[in-house]
């Protein structure tokens, strides 16, 4: 049986629920700690390492996503998904039991590695188990899950911190992760692995070393070590050397993780830079906004999560609006330009906030920032997918995702350095006044706001100025994004890209599969979701198929069961669709009478006329699909043509709506039910 046909609709939904819950876990931990960070710092100490709780997760996730796709092909995606969830659960347990900041940062890195595996395999598992005709709606629903997580993360982090403990932001992953493991083991059948892929281990190692060195340099420079110290200079030189070696390795690798030829495409280069900058800006803001609300304004963790909602709503509005406009008009260039300018404005407005800023004014500022981020995030992946050829579709898509996540890690690290340096400078000014105080009181929001009024005002002022400096330092980043976006070429969008622009997941930057075949199938699934099953009668009618959908369904069932089980018994087909055999016999008997099928003792087979008609049906679907993908300009690529043919074949086989009974035709005698290896598994 083909990879999705063995699952009943109930099991498909169970598979989707498993994948969605896994995706929720991995995405949630990108944002859930933001509102808990001030309390974590107050409990564990180590305020200078605050940003590393987020950076370690993002950096490990970035490296894991570069490796996970190939490992899934090598060992099987189900196994990789299970291993990634297991790693995530174990790391969550040890994060919850952290007794110092170094321990928490280390296990956050392990947790990020597990999350990277989950995120990459989520979309691939949908492609493995969900039929092509149904895949579009499931992928759209996954995008909704990813969007909801952006809303829920800060709020849940605040609720756990205030009403249980910050440790529950990690403990909650354990029962949910175990549930994912249990459902995964019981609902996902094991599938054969693909051909052994070529994994660019050396390239991944070089980019991991380069990223780690450069992020450590930006994190430690001016805080742990002076900028001109041997340690910082050594990290900078090591990072640049590793980056140069990465380029050399990628130029020579058989299957590089990030082919250098992509950067000859100016659209990919601009979109890659913009993705890096958008990730840089977004996570920088999301990480330090709850810190401002709790230290400066005295808000609780829960309240700071709620106060983040205007930002998310703004992001949601412009993501949907820009996607709709791009989908209808095909025009996208000015969205990242305006988005960069509005993001810069939003950051500047945040830098004007103080302890006296009212809730309504703060909400308006956050809403403006969300509007800018939403316009910037929406189009980048779609534009890249629209301009590269089929052979580079997977690596280009994963490359944009990789750069966005890497930008997030750098953004949090660099903003963390700005924050730590500025805060230390502010507090050193008040050293004589604070000398008698326990330093730990200055590290938690509760401790700060329990200080005597004169000292509290000084400390809050120090936090205010430090965080205002962080937001001001982000303004040039938004302006830079707008300037770079001016160089983004406007090219005609493929119809499939226009349809994908309306997906919610694109607006929130949901990770994409690095497999080009799955990317093509996703485009087909998106088109199918837009046009629906209503297109089937027109496709068959245009090809002159007299029997219409009913004939196509019966012939394709016979071919499908014969290919995989050696013969097609109507009783087995009926059992698969949970129908009594008497319901299907009249339809099959009709086509026996018309000469399309032959029947012997309950087993049906195609006659020469039926074989010719089936070939016409398959050709009709391939022609329809080729028409839908006519603007891909890859008709000379044999691999692309093979992928289109396979997608067309799946569309023929996956019509799972049995024809209505034909009561006017006398039924054949019911064949006896049979068990054994020839039974089709539902």
Image (cartoon, rainbow, N blue to C red):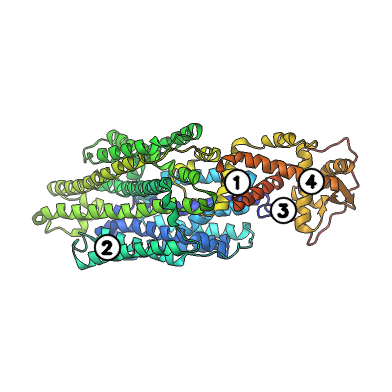
In contact (CB < 8 Å): disc 3 and disc 1: no
Q: CA distance from mark 2 to mark 1?
A: 46 Å
Instruction: Evaluate if marks 2 and 4 touch, with contact meaning CB atoms under 8 Å apart.
Output: no
Query: Cα distance, mark 1 to mark 4?
Result: 29 Å
Q: Is residue 431 left or right of residue 625?
A: left
Number of the label disc, if any, that sits on residue 682: 3
Disc 2: which residue:
236
Q: Which residue is mark 4?
A: 555
Which residue is at 90% across, 52% downward?
600
Residue 554, percent from left and from top: 79, 44
Mark 4 crowdedness (10 Å alpha carbons): few <14, some 14-19, many ≥20: many
Res 459 visible = yes
What residue appears at the point 23 percent right and 39 percent down from the top-left corner?
Answer: 353
Image label count? 4
The residue tagged 1 is 635
Given contact means CB atoms under 8 Å apart, are the residues at marks 2 and 1 in contact?
no
Between marks 2 and 3 in the image, the one whose residue lies nearer the viewer: 2
* Sequence-first tag of 3 and 4: 4
Q: Earlier in the sequence, mark 2 or mark 3?
A: 2
Residue 9 placement (x, y as % from top left): 66, 48
Q: Position of residue 551 (x, y in %)?
A: 79, 41
Q: Which is nearer the N-term, disc 3 or disc 1?
A: 1
Residue plotted at (19% across, 52% down): 422
Q: Residues within 10 Å of mark 3 (few under 14, many from 20)?
A: some
């Amino acid at each position: 049986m083909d990879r999705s046909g063995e699952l009943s609709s109930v099991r498909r939904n169970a598979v989707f629920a498993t994948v969605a819950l896994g995706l929720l876990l991995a995405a949630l931990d990108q944002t859930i700690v933001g509102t808990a960070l001030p309390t974590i710092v107050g409990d564990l100490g180590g305020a200078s390492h605050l940003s590393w709780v987020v950076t370690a997760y993002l950096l490990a996730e970035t490296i894991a996503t570069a490796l996970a796709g190939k490992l899934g092909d090598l060992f099987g995606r189900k196994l990789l998904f299970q291993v990634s969830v297991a790693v995530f659960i174990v790391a969550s347990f040890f994060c919850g039991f952290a007794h110092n900041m170094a321990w928490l940062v280390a296990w956050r890195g392990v947790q990020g590695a597990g999350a990277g595996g989950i995120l990459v395999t989520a979309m691939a598992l949908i492609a493995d188990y969900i039929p092509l005709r149904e895949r579009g709606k499931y992928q759209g629903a996954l995008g909704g899950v990813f969007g909801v997580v952006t809303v829920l993360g800060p709020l849940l982090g605040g609720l756990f911190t205030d009403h249980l403990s910050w440790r529950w932001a990690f403990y909650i992953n354990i029962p949910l992760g175990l549930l994912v493991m249990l459902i995964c083991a019981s609902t996902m059948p094991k599938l054969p692995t693909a051909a052994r892929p070529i994994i660019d281990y050396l390239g991944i190692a070089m980019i991991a070393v380069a990223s780690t060195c450069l992020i450590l340099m930006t994190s430690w420079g001016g805080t742990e070590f002076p900028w001109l110290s041997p340690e910082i200079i050594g990290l900078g030189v090591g990072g640049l050397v590793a980056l140069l070696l990465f380029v050399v390795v990628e130029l020579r690798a058989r299957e590089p993780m990030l082919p250098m030829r992509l950067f000859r495409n100016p659209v990919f280069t601009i979109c890659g830079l913009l993705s890096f900058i958008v990730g840089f800006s977004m996570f920088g803001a999301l990480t330090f906004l709850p810190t401002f609300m709790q230290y400066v304004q005295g808000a609780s963790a829960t309240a700071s999560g709620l106060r983040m909602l205007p930002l998310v709503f703004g992001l949601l509005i412009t993501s949907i609006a820009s996607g709709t406009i791009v989908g209808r008009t095909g025009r996208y260039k000015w969205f990242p330009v305006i988005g960069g300018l509005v993001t810069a404005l939003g950051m500047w407005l945040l830098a004007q906030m103080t302890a006296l800023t009212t809730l309504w004014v703060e909400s308006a500022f956050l809403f403006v920032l969300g509007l800018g981020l939403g316009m910037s995030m929406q189009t980048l992946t779609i534009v890249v997918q629209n301009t590269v050829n089929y052979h580079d579709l997977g690596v280009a898509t994963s490359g944009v995702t990789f750069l966005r996540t890497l930008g997030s890690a750098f953004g949090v690290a660099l903003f963390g350095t700005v924050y730590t340096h500025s805060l230390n400078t502010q507090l050193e000014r008040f050293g004589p006044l604070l000398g008698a105080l326990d330093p730990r009181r200055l590290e938690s929001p509760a401790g700060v706001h329990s200080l005597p009024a004169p000292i509290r005002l000084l400390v809050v002022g120090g936090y205010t100025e430090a965080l205002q400096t962080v937001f001001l330092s982000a303004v040039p980043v938004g302006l830079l994004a707008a300037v770079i976006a001016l160089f983004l070429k406007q090219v005609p969008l493929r119809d499939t890209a226009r349809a994908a622009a309306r997906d919610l997941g694109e607006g929130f930057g949901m990770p994409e599969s690095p497999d080009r075949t799955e990317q093509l199938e996703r485009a087909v699934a998106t088109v199918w979701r837009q046009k629906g099953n209503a297109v089937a009668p027109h496709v068959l009618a245009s090809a002159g198929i007299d029997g219409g959908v009913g004939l196509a369904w019966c012939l394709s069932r016979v071919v499908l069961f014969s290919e995989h089980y050696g013969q097609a018994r109507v009783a087995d087909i009926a059992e698969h669709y949970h129908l009594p055999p008497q319901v299907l016999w009249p339809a099959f008997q009709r086509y026996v009478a018309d000469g399309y099928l032959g029947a012997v003792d309950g087993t049906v087979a195609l006659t020469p006329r039926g074989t010719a008609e089936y070939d016409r049906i398959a050709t009709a679907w391939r022609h329809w699909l080729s028409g839908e993908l006519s603007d891909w300009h890859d008709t000379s690529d044999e691999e692309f043509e093979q992928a289109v043919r396979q997608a067309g074949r799946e569309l023929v086989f996956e019509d799972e709506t049995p024809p209505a009974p034909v009561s006017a035709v006398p039924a054949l005698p019911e064949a006896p039910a049979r068990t054994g290896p020839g039974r089709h598994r539902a």
